[in-house]
Amino acid sequence: MNMHRPALRPAGPLAGRIVRVEPIEERHRVGLREAAERDPQIHRYTNMYSFGFDRWFDLALEGTNDVPFVVCVDGRPVGSSRYLNVEPFHRRLEIGWTWLERAQWGTGANIETKYLLMRNAFDDWGAMRVEFKTDARNLRVRGALLGVGASFDGIFRKHMILPDSIRDSAWYSVVDDDWPQVKAMLEGKIAKHAA
């Protein structure tokens, strides 16, 4: 196994037809806060409520264990995602903390964000497995994960403490064997949304 793969953090933005996924920087704070606060309900299954936006953003800027990104549409921040739980030896990582303002739901922005991040992980970094997890109650996100080609791996019971509940997490994954078919499927979906 070649342990001298390129760094996971891309040298610049990951540009698609719908979104541009940029490494997070201080210049994104105001626009991203506006996107995050337009509809606080989009964060009900996350720890954003526990941290508050500015603490969440400061932790993202530190990026000590994560590789955080801002999702932009037409040059404007509309959400965020990140690589986390990166395990280089096992060639495994998670894509998570993903959220988009409600106006971007159903536009292809989520599909292309996941595509760009997976393409970077599999094609450039050499990932063997990309994982996703969400609150088991979050049926919308669970359906979206199936829609981006992830396979359901199971439920991790009592996985996280949220401000108002104990969370069971649903885990999903795409492995390198799946990636060629998933990649082609996502490219087809993106083409339809971008047309």
Image (cartoon, grey):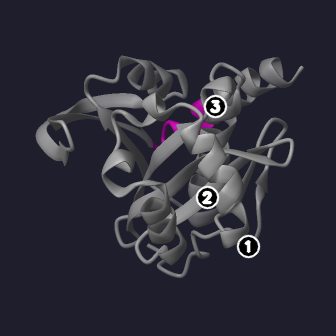
Compute the Cα span from label 1 to label 2.
Answer: 12 Å
Q: What residue type is labelled 1?
A: Ala
Res 119 seen here: no
Whether label 1 touches label 2, CB < 8 Å: no
Please state the horizontal and vertical placement of residue 107, each as a whole percent of the image: 72, 22
Q: In this view, does 85 lie to the left or right of 181?
A: left
Please state the horizontal and vertical placement of residue 99, each as a whole percent of the image: 53, 39
Q: Nearer the viewer, residue 9 or 49?
A: 49
Q: Is residue 171 left or right of residue 65?
A: left
Dot 2 corresponds to which residue?
69
Task: Say which of marks 2 and 3 sits in front.
Answer: 2
Q: What residue type is labelled 3?
A: Ile
Whether label 3 touches label 1, CB < 8 Å: no
Quarter the N terminus occupies: bottom left
Name the mark on residue 11: 1
Q: Is residue 20 left or right of residue 127?
A: right
Q: How crowded is mark 3: few (under 14 residues within 10 Å), some or many (20 or more)?
A: many
Circle nearer the N terminus (2, 3): 2
- Whether residue 67 appears in magenta in the rendering, the answer is no
Circle nearer the N terminus (1, 2): 1
* Identity of the residue drawn at 42% across and 37% down: 43
Dot 3 corresponds to which residue?
111
Residue range of the region highlighted in magenta in the rendering: 175-182
Q: Nearer the viewer, residue 174 or 162?
A: 162
Q: Is mark 3 on a helix, strand or loop?
A: helix
Quarter the C terminus occupies: top right
